[in-house]
Every structure is written in C-alpha cells, then in structure tokens.
Image (cartoon, coloured by chain):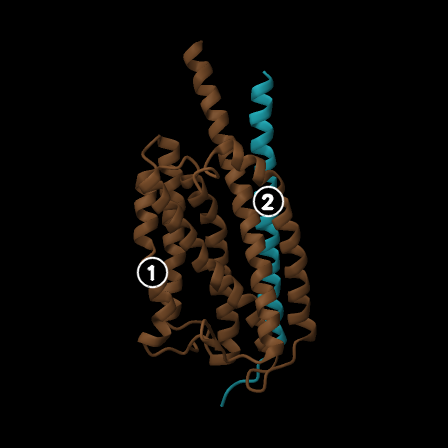
C-alpha cells in the first residue's frame, strides 16, 4: 500500500529551491558583471 | 551575426538588453509561478503535485537549451573564430548547469509522490545527469584553458561533441522504457489542458528571458576581464 504523502511538502520544496537558486544566479551574475566592468574602467583611468 | 561579433557593438547592445531581459524575465516568471502555485487547478490524477510542472519543464528546456547554445557558439568559434563566440559559450555554461541541476532536483521532488521513488536509473534521468556532468567538465575545461592560456578550440570541440547527448535526452522516453512520461508538448500539438498549457508557456518564456539576461551579464563580465588582462599585459610589456 502506498504511504500517504503531503503533496504540498514536495511542491513547496521544488518552488523554494528553484526560486532561491534562480535569484542567486541572477544576483551573482549581475554583481560579478558590475565588479568586472568597474575593474576594467578603473584600469583605463590609471 | 558578423557585425554583432564586434565587441564594441556587442557592448552597446548588451548594456541595455541585459537589464531589460532580466527585468522582463523576473516579472513574467513571478506572474507565471504565482499562477502555478496559487491559481492553477489540481490535476485529476496527480493532484497538487502537478504545480511542479511550472518549474520542472522550463528548467529542463533551459538545461538542454544551454548546451545547445554552447554547441552553436562552439561551432561559430571553430568555423569563423568570432571573438565573442567562446565568451558566449562560457557565458551559457554556468546558467545551463544551474538549470540542469534544478531540473533534476524538481524532477526528483515530483517523482517521489508521483512514482513512489526519488530516482530511477532510466534513460531520461540518467542522460540528464550526464548532461549536468558534461556542464561541470566544460566549466572546468574552459576555465583551465583560459587561465593557462591554451587554445579556446579545445573547449569548443568538447562543446560540440557533448551536443550528442541532447537528442539522447529528448528521445530517451521513446527509445527506452521509462517511468517518465513522453513529451506532452510537441511541434505537432499539445496533450495538455489550457490552464496548464498557457501557464507553462508563460513560465518557460519568463525563465528563458532570465537565462538570456544572465548569459549577456556573464558575457559582459568575461569580456571586461579579458580587456583588463590585455591592458595589464600591455603595460607589463611596456615597462
């Protein structure tokens, strides 16, 4: 007999992991881009 | 395409396109996931777990799409040696790996209540796991080649050869017995009911816009690093 599972536990976990990872990816990419472009622009001014 | 491969022209376009894609992607993804989580109806057989569809399918599409982007950029790198092609391939690798990993994680979380197991070693799941390992290999190889000053043609060949796994993933549910269902959405039509189909298409478009924005941001970062390193080398030679 199949054990009774709460479907919302799996739905919540899937949404939480995906949203957290996607936001982290977007934030990391944007901040890394800004830092790399700042390094380049500061090098040009020296 | 040759004109777009000019770094100055690329930067002119990417300066406004990267934030535009990210903002549009965040808005559309938020709306579609809100619909999927709160408003989409429960499915007759799968019940509430069908809501995982709205994240599992877009992440699977982008996990495979990321490698296709690497393969196309690698082909351009090998044939035309466009200066931005290797940056485009490297830019797509990390987001592709993240979405392949999210596809596996969300699939596992869907499989436990739907199939009664977190994982099975069938064709679809195994070939998707192989794709994730290919991403890890590509990221390590391209990074090492960049650091050590090797030829960018080496990761390009790896990117092209690895593309052989994409049709294997796609057709795995047709070629072999699998717990995974066959594709519900094909060029010939959809087996999905309207409330799921339109929400899914919106979520896929939203995640795709985010993916495009992240790839452009990564390319801008990689290009800035290349320009900084070139300037430091020039100064060292002049000194």
Location of the C terminus of chain B by quadrant is top left
The residue where tag 1 is placed is B165
The spot of residue B3 in percent (x, y) is 47, 37
Residue B201 or B144: which is nearer the viewer? B201
The spot of residue B76 in percent (x, y) is 37, 44
Alpha-carbon neighbours of circle 2 within 10 Å: few (<14), some, or many (≥20)? many
The spot of residue B188 in percent (x, y) is 45, 75
Location of the N terminus of chain B by quadrant is top left
Say which element carries label 1.
helix
Of badges 1 and 2, the one in the foreground is: 2
Alpha-carbon neighbours of circle 1 within 10 Å: few (<14), some, or many (≥20)? some
Q: Which residue is drawn at 49% across and 36% down?
A: B222
Measure the alpha-carbon separation of dots 1 and 2. 29 Å
Residue B13 or B124: which is nearer the viewer? B13
Q: Chain B is drawn in which colour?
A: brown
Q: Chain A is drawn in which colour?
A: cyan
Determine if residue B164 is in view.
Answer: yes
Q: Residue at x 50, y 51 (%)?
A: B95
The answer for which chain carries disc 2 is B
Q: Which residue is drawn at 60% across and 50% down?
A: A24
The residue where tag 2 is placed is B18
Q: Which residue is drawn at 57% across and 48% down?
A: B213
Are the residues flagged by discs 1 and 2 in contact, CB closer than 8 Å? no
User: Is there one chain holding both mark 1 and mark 2?
Assistant: yes
């Amino acid at each position: 007999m199949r054990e009774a599972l709460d479907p919302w536990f799996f739905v919540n976990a899937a949404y939480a992991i995906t949203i957290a990872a996607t936001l982290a990816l977007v934030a990391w990419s944007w901040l890394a881009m800004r830092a790399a472009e700042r390094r380049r622009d500061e090098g040009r001014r020296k | 395409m040759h004109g777009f491969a000019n770094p100055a022209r690329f930067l002119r376009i990417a300066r406004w396109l990267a934030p535009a894609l990210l903002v549009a992607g965040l808005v559309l993804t938020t709306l579609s996931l809100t619909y999927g989580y709160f408003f989409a109806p429960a499915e007759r057989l799968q019940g509430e777990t069908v809501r995982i569809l709205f994240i599992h399918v877009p992440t699977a599409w982008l996990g495979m799409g990321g490698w296709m982007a690497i393969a196309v950029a690698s082909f351009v790198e090998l044939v035309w040696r466009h200066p931005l092609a290797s940056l485009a391939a490297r830019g797509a690798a990390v987001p592709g790996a993240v979405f392949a990993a999210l596809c596996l994680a969300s699939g596992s979380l869907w499989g436990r209540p739907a199939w009664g197991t977190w994982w099975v070693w069938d064709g679809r799941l195994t070939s998707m796991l192989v794709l994730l390992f290919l991403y890890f290999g590509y990221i390590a190889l391209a990074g090492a080649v960049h650091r050590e000053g090797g030829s960018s043609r080496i990761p390009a060949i790896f990117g092209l050869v690895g593309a052989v796994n994409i049709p294997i993933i796609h057709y795995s549910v047709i070629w072999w017995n699998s717990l995974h269902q066959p594709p519900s959405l094909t060029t010939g039509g959809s087996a999905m009911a309207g409330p799921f189909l339109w929400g899914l298409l919106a979520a896929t478009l939203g995640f795709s816009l985010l993916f495009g924005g992240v790839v452009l941001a990564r390319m801008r970062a990689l290009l800035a690093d290349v320009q900084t390193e070139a300037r430091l080398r020039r100064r060292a030679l002049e000194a």
